[in-house]
Image (cartoon, rainbow, N blue to C red):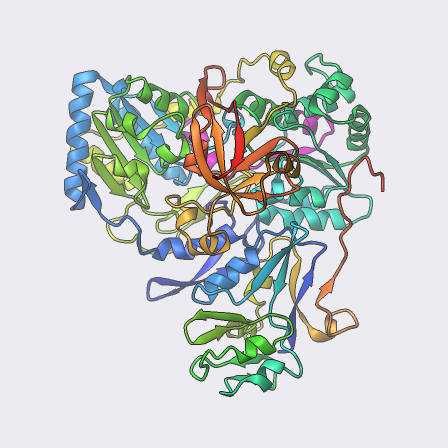
Amino acid sequence: MCSLQCGFAMEVDAGVPVRVDFDGDSPLARGSLCARGHYNLELLLHPRRFLAATVNRRRAPWGTGVTKVAEKLNEIKSTHGGDAIGVILGTELSNEDYETAVGFASGVLGTANIGVAYDGNDYPFLMGGGTGDAVPEDIDDADCFLLVGDVFWGHPCVSKRIIEARHKSRSHHIITVNPYRSNTDWFADAHLQPAVGTEALVLAAILKAMNAQGVPSIDVTQAAIAAGIDPSNIDVIAKRLREFKKVVVVTSSRFGDSAGGYLTAKYSAKIASVVHGKYAPLFRGGNAVGAFKRVGGAKTAAEILHAVAEKQIKALLVLGPDVVQLYPGAVSAGDLEGLEFLAAGSAFENDTTKHSDVGLPLAVWTEYPGTYDPSFGFSTSIDTGLLPQGDGMAAGGMLADIAKSMGAAIGASAAAGAAAAEHPELAIEDEQVLAGMKGTDGLTFVEGIHPLHRWDGTLTGRMSFPAAQSPYCELWVGEEPAAANGIEQGASVVVTTERGETQIIATVTDRMPGGVIAVPSYAPDARGLMVWTLNPKTKWFDVTTSGVKVTPEG
Amino acid sequence: MNCRNVLDYGRCISCKSCLAACFYSHNMQNQLEASPVLTNIVLQMNCRHCEQPLCEAACPQEAIKRRDDGLVVRSNMKCSGCTSCAQACPFGAIDLLKTRHTLDKCDLCNWRTLEGKDSMCAGTCVSGARTFEEIGDIAHDSGIAMRGARTVAKTVRRKR
C-alpha cells in the first residue's frame, strides 16, 4: 500500500521486490496508481537508506543505540520530569505504532507532549466533520461534486472515479473552489476562483446564500467582493448545489492560515450536511486519520516544537518526520543542538538525524505488517512478507525495545484514544476570522502547489523519477507579476522577504492568480523565508510572509 | 496480441503517473517521453509501433525488428547507439542516448501485455485517459492517436 493509501501489488523474487504491479481490488484506487505510488519500489531498494543506528553520528550496533536512548531518557526524566520530554510522530506509521507510542509516552516517559506532524493547517479538523463522511462508493453514485482545492493533484487516484461519475450523465456537475487554475478546474463545469486564502469566506457565503442555519452573519455580496469573485456566482452555485440529489464535497488541505484551513474544512462539511450529501476530507499525509484517532490532538507537533524553541523541552524523540525541513521557520538546527538529547528515527538521513545524538533506522510502511486508516472511512491492513532493510525496524518495535531497556512497561493507550475521539471544536470566532479575509495587494508567497517537485533531502527528493522530471526546484510566478518584475521563463531569480533571500528558478505560468508566487512543499530555503507563528487557538502554525520581492538574479 | 495504447486527452490530468510507471518498470529509464501541452496536458510521445517502421529501415545493425504480432522491438545486444533510428522516427519517439551505446524505445511492456495484462502506462493511469485496447476496438480508425476534445476554461461567467 502506498502512503496515500492506494493499494498496489509487488512482484517479489526471493524476498527482493522486483516490480510494482496493480491491485484491482484496492477499494480506493481500483488498480490505478499515481506517480508517488511507483516510488515505493525505489524506496524499498534505495541505496542511501538509513540502515544502522548512529550514536553521535557514528554507526553503532542497534543495541548500543537503544541503550543510549534509554539511558538519556531515564536521566532527563529523573532530572527534569517526564514533561521535559517530547515525542513527535510522522503520519506514515501504522495504527499499532501509534498505539505503542501513546502507551510509551504515558506509561514509560510520563509525558503528555506527544503530537503528530501533519503538514497541513486543517489539523484540528482531521477527524472529519462527523457529518456523513464519504466512502469510495459514494463517489460513484454522486451526481455533483464540490471540490475545494486542487483535489486531482492532492489525490490523483480519486480523479478517475470522479471523472467517471461526472461522465455518467450530461447533467452531472463538477464545481470547484480553487484560487489557482489547476487540472481539477479544467474538468469543472463551474470554477469559483477566489483570492488566495479566502476559500472559507466563499464557502461561508454559499452557505449563507442557501439560508443554512448556524452560519456566521456575513453579507454575501461583501464576502464575494472581498474574495474577488462576482456575487451573482455565489447564488448560482448555491442554487445548483440544491438541485442535485447526491452531492459529494471533497476538500483538499492547506488553505491560508490555520484558522482559515479549519473553517474551510468546517464549512465544506456543513455544505455537505445542508444538501444531504457526503463530505470527504483528503489527507495527503498517509495514515493521518489513524494517527489522530489514536494520538489525538491534545498536543500538536507545532506546540511541542514551539516548546523546543522556547527551551521548555529538554529531550525530543522524533519518529518519521524531518522537523527541520518541514518547519524551518519554527525550529532551527540550532534549537535542536540546544536540546540535552535528541533521538531521531527516519528511513533516510536528514537534517533532523544529522543533529541527533542517536539516529534510529526506521522501516517503511511496506516492510512490516500493520493496519492503516486512510481517507474515505475504511481500514486496510498490509503484510507484504518483506523484511526491513538493514537494522530498520517499525516505530512500535523500536519503542518496545527502548521501554525494555529503560526497565518500564508500555502503558495502555485507551485513555489517549478516548481523548482523541472527543476532540473539541476549536474556540474560533468565525466572524472575526472571516472578516480578516481579503485579497492582498502586494505579492503573496504560498507553498505546496506542485507535488512532483524535487528537493534534495526529502523522501520525494531522493527518488529518481521526480529528479529526472524536474531537475530543479521551481518558483511558480503568475504572468502579471512576472511581467511587472522583468522575470522570464526559466530565469534564475532572487526571492526576498523580511527574513532573508534565496535564489531559485522561475516558471511563469497562467495557473497562478495575479500577485501570488508559489514554491513547492519541502523547499526549505524558500519555506524558511516565511514567518511561522504558533496560533494558540488552532494550536498550529500560521505561515505568513511580508515584504516579498522577486527580482532577476544579478 | 494486437493492442495499442490509446490516449484520451479529454481526461488527462497531467499527473505523470504513466511516466513514473514506465520509468520504474524499465530499469529507471523512461521509454515514454512527454512534453506539456497548454500546461495542463502531458503529450506522451510514445512509439506508435508503425506498420512500416522507418526506424527499422534506418537501423544499420538490424537491431530493430517488427514482429509478427505488430510489436516493433529493439535488441539491446545489437544496438550500437548510432542514433539513426532516432533521426528516422517521424514522431520523436526514440530518445537519444540515455544509456551509452543504446537507445530506448517503447516495448509495449511485452513481458506483461503478452500475458493479457495492460501496459504499465495504461494500467496505472489514474484518470482513465490512457487505455490499452484491441486495434479493432479503437473507434473506426486504427491510426488514431488522440481522441476526445477538451473545452478550455469552463467557468460560471462564460455560461457555456
Question: Which of the two residues, A139 or A467, is positioned nearer the viewer here?
Answer: A467
Q: Is residue A126 left or right of residue B12?
A: left
Q: Quadrant of residue A218?
A: top right
The residue at the point 56 percent across, 79 percent down is B85
Q: Horizontal and vertical percent for residue A413?
A: 35, 28
Whether residue A434 sits left or right of residue A349 in the image: it is: right
Where residue A150 sits, quadrant-wise, is top right
Q: Is residue A280 magenta?
A: yes
Q: Is residue A434 above or below residue A361?
A: above
Locate residue A278, reporting x and y percent. 66, 34
Q: Position of residue B139 (x, y in %)?
A: 77, 69
* Of the pair A273 and A261, the residue shown nearer to us: A261
The magenta segment: A270-296
Task: Give the number of callouts.
Answer: 0
Instruction: Find out whether residue A315 is within the magenta segment.
Output: no
Answer whether residue B67 is visible to the viewer in this image: no
Q: Is residue A166 above or below residue A220?
A: below
Left or right of A64 in this view: A21: right
Query: For residue A249, what is the image quadrant?
Result: top right
